[in-house]
Amino acid sequence: MVELAYAIVVLLLTGFVILDGWDIGAGLIHFAVGRNEAERGLVIRAIGPLWVWHEVWLVALGGVLFAAFPAVLASAFAGFYLALFLLLWSLILRGVALEVRGLVRDPLWREAWDFAFAVASLLLALLIGAALGNVLRGVPLGASGDFTLAFFTNFRVQGTVGILDWYTLSIAGFFVTLLGAHGASYLAVKTTGPVHDRSERLARWLWFAVLALLVVTCAETAVVRPELFAGIGRRPLAWLPAGVFGAGTALAVIGQWRRRERAAFLGSCLLIGGLMAAGAAGIYPVMLKSTLDPAASITAAGGATDAAGLRVALLWWPLAFGLAVSYALIVYRHYRGKVPATDSGPGY
Amino acid sequence: MNDPYFWSRLQFGFTITYHYLFPQLTMGLAPLLVIWKWRALRTGEARYAQAARFWAKIFGLTFAVGVVTGIPMEFQFGTNWAGFTRYSGGVIGQTLAMEGMFAFFLESAFVGALVWGERRLSPRTHFLAAVGVALGSWLSGYFILVTNAFMQHPTGYALAADGRLHLADLGAYLGNRWALVMFTHNQAAALVTGGFVVAAVGAFYALRREHLDSARLFLRTGVIVGLAASALVAFPTGDAQAKLVAQYQGPALAGMEGRFHSGARAEINLIGQPNVREQRLDNPIRIPGLLSFLAFGHVESDVRGLDSFARDTWPTDIEILYYSFHIMAGLGTVFMVLMLAAAAQLFRGRLPESRVLLWLLLMAFPFPFIANTAGWCAAELGRQPWLIYGLFRTDQGGSAVVSSGDTVFTLLGFLGLYFVVGVVYLGLFWRELLHGQTEADHG
């Protein structure tokens, strides 16, 4: 039961990173692929009408964490207090920028919101990357189940750690590169003309960087959280996402090589999904690791609500998820194909 | 200020108040959009399609601000109210998760299609998008109100051995009587906002003598919806809500009415200032027996005052509670009178020429927002000093590890950011008002 609830949490987190990841990624390379107002307008229209739906995966993640693992949510959210508010403010800025940019036909107005979109996306990628790094490294949890975390302490990964240290910073850097590559692959699929060509070129460089950084990141993780790889090796169920990750990497590389946009983008999605899911399977059952005392770590079973509550949630959740995906498929179907290069007013 | 969680309370209060300015308008507009899309589909008349197109843009803008200001609400349970989350997450987490999964996914999938997708979607699909958005927004309201109703009047829970609340009966939790009453009351109040805003825009165009077709349609729809909703918000929904408060939250009712002393033939105080130190109401104008009648159905009924409750169960901010309730009830009365007058002129066909009434309708648009806010302040301040009424006190629920300095910083951040968001929103609303009817781009 707890395993299923954990799997749902991982699924929602992974879905958020893949889906909103391409919106954030597009924001990261917004000024690199869109050199003028019209081109940047194309980038925004390529993200299209579904960024809110992508962001809702984060809301759903928060809700399910609340229902299934309230003690984990309470510890983690209070502990990451300031960082979480930075994340929320970046989300607000990003959302407002995407919604209001197109409403006024004025070059200065649009450039201002383009800038806000790019900055907010960079902050989001850094913060989410650093947050994932923190989950992998662990936090200074005491016996009370609470912790507080400074932004930085001594940049080491043991003892009284801060949010930023050499490891979490490198994970954040890797994450920015990964989402940039993901966003570039997405824009290559959805656009035509100069934006398409630049995205395609940029995607190659970024994927090259991702593969290089991936080796470094894995080596670092083997040092900081050795039980992750041991966990993957021990659990046959974790081999599936690991396989997905491998297939995704191959598909992304081949897609880039042969200029198959869709294959490359699909590979990108699989790579991210496999990476997140394999990592989550590797660290199970620990949800929040303590850097002070292994016994103070919060496990899935320790942070979960009672079995009856979990059973209820597991009963209605598949229905809700099925409905949610079916709505999105309807909208994706209407929004399929390349976005027209000429701006014929807002809308599609 | 002695309250350790003062800043957390202020931050949650400010962010939820600001957030709810937007969903009340989207929930109020959503059914109107469905009606206009339906009429456009059935009659083929351009004015309905045009109305839906115009209000869909307002809706989209309002929805976007509602989304981005809503996400911090869910997160603040964990960041600022970790004690509350640990204690009750097993119960209220269910509806917060359901809101995201059932309602918010539905609404967010279709809102883009509704606002921007008219060119690619068939008229039927576009109509269905409007239905999906409306359904999602009201469903979202229900799940949030179930969560709040649990805090007002807990049902369906069990206290487990580890000292935390667990869900015992999902049906009793979702079907909480308090939630059903509060939902009808709150949705009627959202429709008041929707009706008043639509009528105000109609009045704006009528006074400027432009877009007269739209003006007539907006006035008609706005006044009919506004009148019906203003009536429903008072009776039966407001009446039922007040009776629940009288039955289950005695100190809250006493605080709302500024009733310090118990007794029969309890009066309604139309105006007056609560003087908590002297335990009396200054300068009151009262109607004897009316409170007894409204709360318990008989003018002679005994209504308990604050003096009959233990001091540590008194609401913590009696003055604001009293004014919130009176502002809500007073404005509700004004709304009914104004909408009755407007409806009388409407059915005589003279509303578009009645300049005084048009001015009143135009200037009235902020007041439903004030009344909704005041109503929620009354509900939430009446709940104090409890987080979950009778079970869990507010001073047990905060995050012990978060410093007041951190909270003040984030509160200041919200104040700044929300000020900018508000200015941008109002500017764009104004722009849409001036140009939205004539712009050539269709969707």
Image (tube, helix red, strand yellow):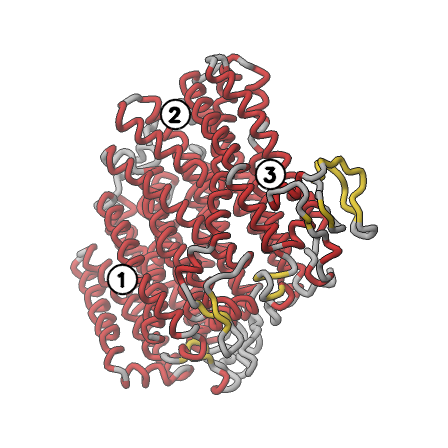
Residue plotted at (58% across, 60% down): B389
Which residue position holds label 2?
A: B439
x, y percent for residue B429: 49, 33
Relative to A286, B410 lies left or right = right
Assign a secondary structure to mark 3.
helix
x, y percent for residue A138: 47, 78
Query: Is A39 situated above or below B306?
Result: above
x, y percent for residue B179: 48, 52
Q: Amino acid at mark 1?
A: Cys
Q: Disc 1, disc 2: CB below 8 Å?
A: no
Q: Amino acid at mark 2?
A: Glu
Q: Quadrant of residue B314?
A: bottom right
Q: Residues within 10 Å of mark 2 (few under 14, many from 20)?
A: few
Which residue position holds label 1?
A: A269
Q: Residues within 10 Å of mark 1 (few under 14, many from 20)?
A: many
Relative to A231, A152 lies left or right = right
- Of residues A323 and A246, the one drawn nearer to the viewer in this rendering: A323
Q: CA distance from mark 2 to mark 3?
A: 32 Å
